[in-house]
Amino acid sequence: MRRECLKRTMRIAILADIHGNKTALDAVVEDLQNQRVERVIVAGDLVNRGPANREVVEAVQALGWEVIQGNHDQLVVDWVRRKVPAEWYTDPLWRPLEWVARQVGERVRELEGLPACARVQVPGAQPVLIVHGSPRHNREGLHPFLRDEKVAEILDGVEEPVVVCAHTHIPLDRRVGRWRVINPGAVGTPFNRDPRAHYTIFTLGRDGTWEVEFRRVNYDRRPVLRAFEESGYLACGLMAHIFYSEFLHARSLLYHYERWANERRVPLDKTSWYRFLRELDLHDGRPGQDQTRRMIWSSPSGH
């Protein structure tokens, strides 16, 4: 009877892609206070993209949460350990990464020691595998548009019937063959055009299967937008501007911008970036320049 009660009531929070957004992380922590979870697992990417990287690493460590290594965590480690291409260190496009690495400082050792995956194994319950990108690589995303055949190829050899992945910043609950694939979405930089902080809660049912709740937490995004500028991050270069716009619009822009620039054979610089934004009928989100931007900055939810 005791084991059956434990199985019915066990609740686990799984979140991912905080990306240096301490304000969003704080909102999730506050939301979790009322959720009665017994375990919290972070599926990677504590850092990069956002302006409060050291603060996020320190906060998650203080909370004692389990964390696996995401591709951006690995990227910062590789930058510090001089494992990225040598030309990156002199390329202005990558200058913001140097800023992030300096901000993380000696905490890079904690990022370096993170495991590649985690597992949830409860007697009588479906086993769960948690990775950042895919079981094959932390930069391989299980995007919603992938065909079932491709997803099955990526998951070939995975014994766990439930696979939790992150990386795409897009919430997902999909069945492919014998697998159920869950993406909790992103805490810090969602790409589904919903700017709230996203995460999931897994509740163990009587039959040993997991019920998954996708939670969306509203918070005031204005401090994050200010921190991009006031911290000096935005002044570092183009990549920080791109991450700023991705945060502002809650959508993926870097990949599409790179493809757009390659098709037109133009360099990745601020001139082409602002042209790209104009063609998408977007803006860079800097305050005080037009009515749309003033509305975004004045709204606590970012809508």
Image: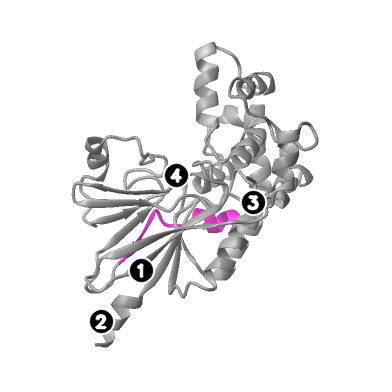
| Element class at badge 2 | helix
x and y, in percent, of residue 114 in the image: 46, 57
Q: Position of residue 12 (x, y in %)?
A: 40, 68
Q: Which residue is mark 1?
A: 203
The kind of residue on which mark 2 rests is Glu
Nearest to the observer: residue 6 or residue 78: 6
| Residue at 65%, 40% in the rendered image | 98
Look at the numbered disc 3 and give the secondary structure of its residue.
loop
- The answer to whether mark 2 and mark 3 are in CB contact below 8 A is no
Q: Measured from the top left, where is residue 3 in percent x and y?
A: 26, 83
Question: On the image, numbered disc 2 is attached to which residue?
Answer: 4
Viewport quadrant of the N terminus: bottom left
Residue at (31%, 70%) from the top-left corner?
204
The residues tagged by marks 1 and 2 sit, at their Cα atoms, a distance apart of 13 Å
Q: Residue at x 52, y 19 (%)?
A: 260
Q: Is residue 93 magenta?
A: no
Residue on which disc 4 sits: 170
Looking at the rendered structure, the kind of residue marked 3 is Ser
